[in-house]
Image (tube, rainbow, N blue to C red):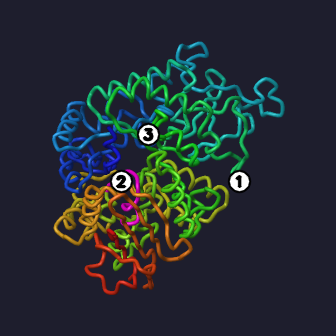
Amino acid sequence: MEWWKDAVVYQVYPKSFKDSSGDGIGDINGITEKLPYIRELGADVVWLSPIYDSPQDDNGYDIRDYYKLLKEAGTMEDFDRMLSRAHGLGLRIIMDLVVNHTSDEHVWFQESKKSKDNPYRDYYIWKEGKRQNTREGLDTSKEQAWGDEPNNWGSCYSGSAWEWDSTTKEYYLHLFSRKQPDLNWENVLVREEIYKMMRWWLDKGIDGFRMDVISLISKLPGYPDGEAGESGYTSFEVTANGPCVHEYLKEMNRKVLSLYDVMTVGECSGVTLEEAWKYAGAEEGELNMIFQFELMELDCENGIKWDLKPLDFIRMKKIFEKWQTGMYGKAWNSLFWNNHDQPRVVSRWGNDSGEYRELSAKMLASILYGMQGTPFIYQGEELGMTNPGLSIEECRDIETLRMYQERLEAGCSRAEIMRSVHAKCRDNARTPMQWDDSPNAGFSTGDPWMPVNPDYKTINAGAQLQDEDSVFHYYKKLIRLRKTYDVFRDGRFTMEYKEDPDIIWYTRTGEKESLRVICNFHELTRAIKLPDNEEWGELLICNYPEIRKETELRPYEARMYLV
Ligand code: NOJ
């Protein structure tokens, strides 16, 4: 059954969602308490970012034990209660599956690094240094030296992707932090362990997985150098979509996923349309859908997220068109503006200054919710939560802190680095959820692990639930519309006004009806005109209280018509 095609997913970042114990860290009982809120919005599925046992080097994306929960998150009984409460409310739960790497504190790695003949040695990727044998030109007073690493691959968190281990005198690969060693998927024992663990969670009754950086699991044979970037290291994109990734996913599907009625979404950066058809193609037997990140690169230079550049709106429309038409009838899309790795979209591409915040948040939602695919809402997006403008001392994320250090050392000015941090850091999305206007936004009675955005007095769930015109209610209405008309799921996509610098206008053509979505992306009023002999149709939703003139769009105005 393809229930996931009609589903709307709500992503919870547990650490920042709701703290029930008063220790300042969100927990499972907090999530359980708020399930009715998620249901009220109209979502059908909850994606939980990792809540497993973890030393938290990367906020839980570094797992120490896949079968245990993080102490601060709660107990397995809490989890079972949450799951059964969710199911009782008609909500499904999908978990984050993080299997490109583990924590270095996972027992497999603890064993693996003991000796070269340890039974777990091959669970990870160990290599000799490039010049290990000759050590020619190396400073032999040190065990490791620049240029000795097995290749020039870079870690996503700055610096080399290889870490020297002085016990066994080899390097291990870590595409993320050095506390996140990459698993060796070529080893069948690793794959079987992972499938066993997946079955364990599915047997518990969870409803699927979001798969963390799943496009990275198969590495290039021979581990060749990539083209080096400015920092001397290659981007991790070289390592994506390796030669065996589809073989592994087909195996996983055969041995695990196909045995359950579940939903899967794979995180796949650096993916082309052709690759996406393989990952998510209806006939391929791999995943139901993927996240691709082409839009997320629109405001950075050369794919480097910290190097800012203004949004190219026309290019944005081209990307939408490419994925909406290119996937049609072949594979299923996911739709998202936000997640725990991205800045808040209303600050990024809307307008978060008072007057236009709500209008632009609703406009952005309208653009996405008329499209084909499964929408993902990130906690607080449905309130139009904004970037908090954190100081570097308030940032917690390893990626930001390491980049800050690296760029300072390279001579960049603090002001310039902070501009990037404010625009792009992942902590933008990780401040506590704003539940109400009580202290700490109702997130915790303790001291929150991350500062609360000071705008919580005006932007919070309590206030928006009371207000029929709020961003929350607008999302709710969009979700209801998606469930009412088949055209949202099935209609064929056509982009109109392709070269217009302000307006995004597309149609979806279904068997019974068509949908017309028209939005003004900017803060100026614009004239619009229907093609001759056409009619506007029935207005399904608009982010202004009334249409003033059919032939003009006010700042950030969004409309959807059923024709
Ligand atoms: C992608 C996740 O979304 C991100 O938060 C995490 O840091 C990396 N994968 C590493 O697991």
Quarter of the C terminus within the rendering: bottom left
Task: Give the class, few, some or many, for how many residues have Cα within 10 Å of label 3's Cα (few <14, many ≥20).
Answer: many
Residue 363: percent from left, percent from top: 37, 70
What residue is disc 3 on?
61
- The alpha-carbon separation of the residues under discs 2 and 3 comes to 33 Å
Task: Assess whether mark 3 and mark 2 are in contact (beta carbons under 8 angstroms).
Answer: no
Looking at numbered disc 1 in the image, what kind of residue is underneath it? Answer: Glu
Residue at figure coordinates x 23%, y 65% from the top left: 473
What residue is disc 2 on?
489
Task: Assess whether mark 2 and mark 1 are in contact (beta carbons under 8 angstroms).
Answer: no
Residue interval drawn in magenta: 366-379
Whether residue 338 appears in this view of the structure is no
Marked residue nearer the N-terminal end (2 or 3): 3
As helix, strand or loop, the secondary structure at mark 2 comes to helix
For marks 1 and 2, give the one nearer the viewer.
2
Looking at numbered disc 3 in the image, what kind of residue is underneath it? Answer: Tyr
Residue 372: percent from left, percent from top: 40, 55
